[in-house]
Amino acid sequence: LAKTTQPISMDSYEGQEVNITCSHNNIATNDYITWYQQFPSQGPRFIIQGYKTKVTNEVASLFIPADRKSSTLSLPRVSLSDTAVYYCLVGEGNFNKFYFGSGTKLNVKP
Amino acid sequence: SAVISQKPSRDICQRGTSLTIQCQVDSQVTMMFWYRQQPGQSLTLIATANQGSEATYESGFVIDKFPISRPNLTFSTLTVSNMTPEDSSIYLCSVEGHLGTLNTEAFFGQGTRLTVV
């Protein structure tokens, strides 16, 4: 059973910052939050993972409030190539099997 | 990161037949999983492939229909048996836990697109 809830779809324009929020009310103490990106005809690709507060890498930032019941993936200055489905997953950091939710289909327009 | 090779990348099969999908990883990993993704849908976990023992299946999936092997830490197979058109889907292999690293992220293969006619 998926443990997460995300918006089904979002639209954005090139150059904008996009924030996708995920709800995970029943997150367990040992659970990490991981985001994946999937393009058509490809397997999901890891974007970022975090446990609390803020994590940033070269492609995205992940904001996690103190209660950890939600998280927000932030994509700075999106381009057309960021059009994809984004999945928020929660699970133990070590060797967890993921149950995928519906994901958020991001459509970036010119 | 891991390099995962899935074979075949796609196939068209007759109903009633079986297809075996292979997943090869370029390094030893602790965990290997099999997922199914139907067109336009999210991924559904089929089973965890356990090395040297029977796979652990999720609800709705059974060994007779989806037998899985995992003879070592770099290789696994998923067989789709006695296929029907409802088995038409993309099947994906996923791996986690690269030995000798602290890497905990999951890596996915490109998938096998199966069409049953």
Image (cartoon, rainbow, N blue to C red):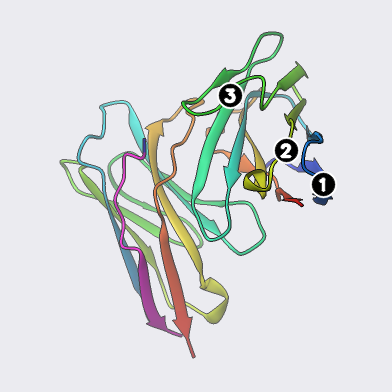
Mark 2 and mark 1 in contact? Answer it, CB < 8 Å.
Answer: yes
**Apparent side of residue A29 relative to residue A57 in the rendered image (left or right):** left
Q: Is mark 1 on a helix, strand or loop?
A: strand
Between the residue at mark 3 and the residue at mark 1, the CA separation in whole angstroms equals: 25 Å
**At 41% from the left edge and 72% from the top edge, which residue is drawn?**
A76
Tell me which corner region of the image, top left, top right, bottom left or bottom right, holds residue B77: top right
Residue B5, x across and y down, in percent: 79, 42
Are there few (<14), some (14-19), or many (20+) residues within 10 Å of tag 1? some
Magenta region: A2-14
Instruction: Give the quarter of the figure containing the N terminus of chain B.
Output: top right
**Apparent side of residue B104 relative to residue A100 in the rendered image (left or right):** right
Answer with mark 3 or mark 2, whichever residue precedes in sequence: 3
Residue nearest the viewer, comparing A107 with B105: A107
**Residue B13 marker:** 1
**Apparent side of residue A86 relative to residue A21 in the rendered image (left or right):** right
Amino acid type at mark 3 = Thr
Residue sitting at the far bottom: A110
**Residue B83 marker:** 2
The subunit carrying tag 2 is B
The subunit carrying tag 1 is B
Compared with A96, A100 (above or below) is below
Are there few (<14), some (14-19), or many (20+) residues within 10 Å of tag 2? many
Between the residue at mark 2 and the residue at mark 1, the CA separation in whole angstroms equals: 8 Å
Q: Name the residue under label 3.
A: B48
Tell me which corner region of the image, top left, top right, bottom left or bottom right, holds residue A17: bottom left
Compared with B107, A59 (above or below) is below
Amino acid type at mark 2 = Met
